[in-house]
Amino acid sequence: MAKQIVHYQKLFRIVSDRIQSGEITGKLPSIAEFTAEFGVSHNTVKKVIDQLKLAGRVYGFQGKGVYVLGPGPKVNNRGVIGICIECAALRNPFYLKVFDALRNELRERDFDFKYFQSAAQVVGDYVDGIIFIDYYLTDLEAQVISDRFGVRLVVVNRKIAPITTVGNDNFSCGYMALEYLHRQGHRKIGLISRDTHIKKSIFDYRMQGVMKYVGEHPEIEIADSPIHITRGGADEIFASRAARELLDARKDLTAIFAFTDVLALGVLSELQQRGIRVPDDISLCGVDNRDFSVLMNPPLTTLEEPAELVAHQAMEMLLRQIDEGRWLDDLLLPPVMVERASVKQNS
């Protein structure tokens, strides 16, 4: 059979129609698949994808592909839920998991959904309820949106009064990491933290959890090497430098707790350059359970944030608030310790 050949505008319409009908959901076919099907050039497909992004139909995630925004056809017209998240936040694997899990929740419950990138778009539209994912609202924006939508609002991972918050318990991340290392016999523990000077940030809360546990166990000594990441800075490079300073100052550390897996990656690099073995010489623990953490050498012990459960509870609380007509108390969900080979018992 002869391969059908189409031009840019026609291909754009074809792909848009497939998205609208629900024929294409989730991850978009690859550029190679489009070129093979339609006999078009790589640049033509790329142009179509760029236009779909501008039209708000798809979004790209570096290294993982391009994904469709929005559901297929409505099932029974039960309502429309808005999800507001900035494009930059979708680069964070945790928020991408929350976003995908929320879309799955909505499909399973037969809801349609609208995707918003800003509070201004939310105010200018109508939905039955809105979930903001890691979105910073100014006091004025929060007031305007809550005045308009009432209790039909939930925020993931930020506290914005009076809106109900559902998220990861970052205080518990710090507390549980120190508790785990202490239980493994470690008493001299280094910290590679970041941005703890920003009050009410996830890192501030993680540090509060660390200090709470240390305050309860005075036998623990901690040495902190805080990092202030500049915009566009590479966390692992900053972490490697911070680890260098920490290790030069403290030769007696038996464990290091890095506030993210990316920071732990930088710490591991510095340790390997010095010939310090993990976990034989120093144990290492992180937070996030990023995809690469299991591929590190050795695989990283880390705390995993419950993204799917956060999404489920955010949806549950939003629907309860809509039904009951009142705000619910904030809900913070503890992480789960993922034990791997980077921590050992310190005798």
Image (spheres, rainbow, N blue to C red):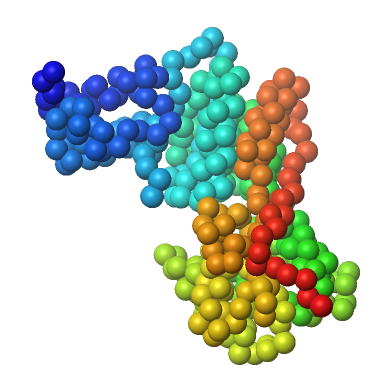
Work out whether residue 23 or residue 78 is closer to the camera in this orientation and state it.
Answer: 23
Q: 311 or 187: which is nearer to us?
A: 187
* Residue 222 image-quadrant placement: bottom right
Give the position of the N terminus as an image quadrant. Answer: top left
Specify whether 305 is left or right of 236: right
Q: What residue lies at 13% left-to-right and 22% top-to-bottom?
A: 4
Report whether residue 151 is seen: no
Quadrant assignment, res 345: bottom right
- Left or right of residue 329: residue 100: left
**Along the viewing direction, whichever of 318 and 212 lies nearer the viewer:** 212
Q: Is residue 33 left or right of residue 176?
A: left
**As displayed, is residue 237 above or below residue 62?**
below
Numbered disc total: 0
Q: Position of residue 136 (x, y in %)?
A: 55, 48
Residue 93 lies, with reference to residue 256, above or below; the image says above
| Quarter of the figure with the C terminus | bottom right
What's the residue at 14%, 37% (across, down)?
A: 41
In the image shown, does 75 or 345 lie closer to the viewer?
A: 345
> Residue 124, percent across and down?
46, 29
Identify the residue at the far top of this view.
76
Q: Which quadrant of the figure has residue 21? A: top left
- Looking at the image, residue 13 sits to the left or right of residue 286; the answer is left
Residue 17 point in image, percent of width and height: 30, 19
Q: Position of residue 267 (x, y in %)?
A: 56, 74
Q: Name which residue lies at 69% across and 28% down.
A: 316
Residue in view at x 73 percent, y 70 percent = 344
Q: Is residue 220 visible?
A: yes
